[in-house]
Image (cartoon, grey):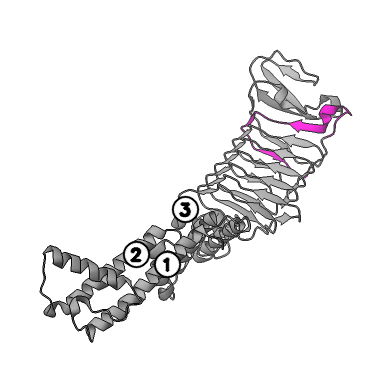
Amino acid sequence: MEYYKAQVEPLNLKSEYELIMVGYEVQICLTSAKPADIIYDVSKLRQRKIFTEPIEIRSPFVWEGNGSTYGSSINLSNCVFKGKLIITNHHFPQEVTFNDVTFLNGADFSNTKFDNNVRFHRAVFHEMAEFKNTTFNNLVDFFLAVFKKDQQFHLTDFNGIAIFSNTSFYNAIQFLHNKVSSSTYISFESAKFYNGVDLSRSNFLCKLKFWGVTMHNLKLESICTNLLYMYDNEALTNEQDTISTAKKIRESMRMIKQAFRADHNNIEALHFHKLELACYKYEIGLSKNKFAERRLLWLNSISNSHGTSWTRGLGFTLLVTLIFYLIFILVLSPQLRFDFSLTGIVNFIRYFIQLLNITNWKYQPFGLDTAPWGDIVLYTGRIFISYGYYQLIQAFRKYTKN
């Protein structure tokens, strides 16, 4: 028989379950030769339960009832585990609930199978929880859960519905070598990621939902040196570099982008397309042999923010037109007499607007002969002006169907 102590306030308890009272401590029997002694619903204790000792149940067993209805579920809600909760190599055929639970020193559910619904609503994990080789055959729900440290789901099987709705990941989060089924549905609706996410090798070949997801403080310099992202939480023996880590994050942004496109949400897809390119820009920035690509990405960024800002596209077009117009005037300055009257200002604006018309091949501002240097400036400028128009149109495409 195993007993675990929970500090509680004085109780006036009415329960169909057996408790062993020792002063103001309640000893809760988790396993017993008599099934009637097993506490299935710890939430019957209305006060907050604080377990002061580590709970470690390693030998395989099945939580069984005595034929009554309360044996069909296990409720460990509203608990505080100060020590590490270890429940490994077990099989749970019934529903298990960990709502409003605080795990101060981590938890370990490795090699455990959950056949029914499992809920971690509003659970707070202060240290990494182990889900290695854990199988969820039905619903697993982390609604409003909080992961404060690096978190990894390694070799975790999601065979039903996995909910990470409104879940907050304050450090790295990685899904690695997972297994899903043809009916698996995984939702990250309104999830908050504060240090990126690695889905690159998740094997999530299933329905994904990312509506309302938020990426806070996507600082690639910090993300790409995170040890979980670099080494997959294994022993630090294999050489890695920040370039390959950047590829993992870039692939994750691409997967989220594709999930939005599959839902015909092209607006949000463009945002993650922008993040994907930002990751690629950082990635090639670490390489010494991709100077041309870095310049192209930089130009794409300033011209329309990777297809997400039509105002930046318009501003870029007007700016490059103005720059080449001023260069054009500088080349022609020996033939010009500057007139600051109203007529002179109107002519200045008129020929600037004419330069925006890239189909006008008889452009002769102020009636002057532009050959040869003026023509060189004109044709070079129109290359950049045309590029500005293209980027402007690309940015507007986010409001249309792909």
The reply to whether discs 3 and 1 touch (Cβ–Cβ < 8 Å) is no
Q: Amino acid at mark 1?
A: Gln
Query: At numbered mark 2, what does the secondary structure look like: helix, strand or loop?
Result: helix
Q: Quadrant of residue 331?
A: bottom left
Query: At numbered mark 1, what does the secondary structure look like: helix, strand or loop?
Result: helix
Q: Residue furthest bottom?
A: 372
72 falls in the magenta region: yes
Q: Is residue 16 left or right of residue 156?
A: right
Q: Amino acid at mark 2?
A: Phe
Mark 1 neighbour density, 10 Å: few (under 14) some (14–19) many (20 or more): many
* Residue at screen point 41% across, 75% down: 292
**Mark carried by residue 316:** 2
Q: Nearer the viewer, mark 2 or mark 3?
A: 2
121 falls in the magenta region: no
Residue of label 3: 218
Mark 2 neighbour density, 10 Å: few (under 14) some (14–19) many (20 or more): many
Q: Is residue 251 above or below residue 63?
A: below
Q: Residue furthest top?
A: 12
Pick the residue in front: 40 or 236: 40
Query: At numbered mark 3, what does the secondary structure look like: helix, strand or loop?
Result: loop
Q: Nearer the viewer, mark 3 or mark 1?
A: 1
Distance between the alpha carbons at the discs numbered 2 and 3: 25 Å
Q: Quadrant of residue 54?
A: top right
Q: Amino acid at mark 3?
A: Leu
